[in-house]
Amino acid sequence: MKRTIYRYGPLTRVSHWLWVIAFGVLVSSGLQIFNASPHLDASDKSNPARRVLSIGSPTDGVGTTTVFGHTFTTTGWLGWGSDGMGGATARAFPAWITIPSYQDLADGRRWHFFFAWIAIVCWVTWVISAIVNGNLKKMLLRPSDIPKLWPMQAYYLKLRKEPPPHGLYNPLQKASYTAIGFVIAPLVVITGLALSPGIDAIANPLTVLLGGRQFARLWHFTGMILLLGFFAIHLFQVLTQGVVNQLNAMITGRYRLSEHEVES
C-alpha cells in the first residue's frame, strides 16, 4: 500500500512560497533595472567590442536584440514596446513584465533590494531547516546518483515505464537542489552584492574578483536565466509527477509515496 509521510515542515513550506513570490518580483524589477542600461559586456568596464547582449531601438517603432553580434528584429517584445502609460517607446523589456511597469530605475531598485533580502532569508531558512530535519543529506547529489540521471529523465519524457529506484528525492531533484541551492543561488547573491554601490564601496575586492562590475552584471543576469530554467524544469516535474500530491505536500507537508519511492 502507498504510504503517506510528513515530508516538509512549516519553515520549509513558508520559505518555499515566499521565495516563489520574491523570485517573481526580483525578475520583474531586475528587468526594470536592466532597461536603464540594456546591454551586457564580457569586460571589466562597458565595452561595445565585447558585447554579449544588447537590446535597443535603431529607429522609432523598431526593436532589435543582438546576441554575440547576431541581430534579430524583436519589435513589440524587446527593444520597442509598451511604456506602461498607454503608449509605446524604446525600452529593452516591455511594461507588462517589469516592476514598476513604467520606466523608473529608482523604484525598480527599491523593489529589487527589498525582495532580494527576503529571498536570501528564505534561502538561509531552507538550508537551516533541511539541516535540522535531516533532509539535507537526502537532497544532495551523490556520485551514485549520476548514472541514474538519464534514466530518470527518460521516465519523465515517457521513454521508459518505470523510474530508477531512488529514495525520497529522485536523482534529477537532487541535481536541481544541489546546483540551485549551493552553486547558482550563492552566485546570484554574491554578484548582486558586488553590483550594490554601497557594498562595492566597502568590499571592492569582491567586484574585482568577479572581473569588474560589467562582468558581475553578466554573471548576475546569467544566474537569473539559470534560475528561470530551474523553475521551468521544476514545474515540469511537478506537472508530470502528480501535481495534486506535490502541491499537497508543499501546502500541508503530507506526501504520498509511490511504489518506486522509499522514505530514506
Image (tube, rainbow, N blue to C red):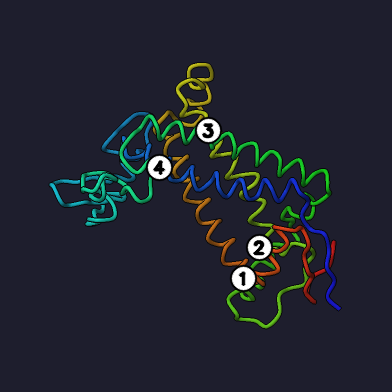
For label 3, the residue is: 114
The secondary structure type at the circle numbered 4 is loop
Mark closer to the observer (1, 3): 3
**Crowd class of label 4 (few under 14; some 14 to 19; many from 20; radius 10 Å):** many
**Of label 2 and label 1, which has the lower sequence position?**
1
For label 2, the residue is: 172
Q: Nearer the viewer, residue 79 or 97?
A: 97
Disc 1 residue type (three-letter)? Gln
Between the residue at mark 1 and the residue at mark 4, the CA separation in whole angstroms equals: 35 Å
Between the residue at mark 4 and the residue at mark 2, the CA separation in whole angstroms equals: 33 Å
The secondary structure type at the circle numbered 2 is helix
Between the residue at mark 2 and the residue at mark 3, the CA separation in whole angstroms equals: 32 Å
Task: Assess whether mark 1 and mark 2 are in contact (beta carbons under 8 angstroms).
Answer: yes
Mark closer to the observer (1, 4): 4
Q: Residue lying farthest bottom?
A: 161
**Residue 168 screen position, x and y as percent:** 78, 63
In the image: residue 173, left or right of residue 82:
right
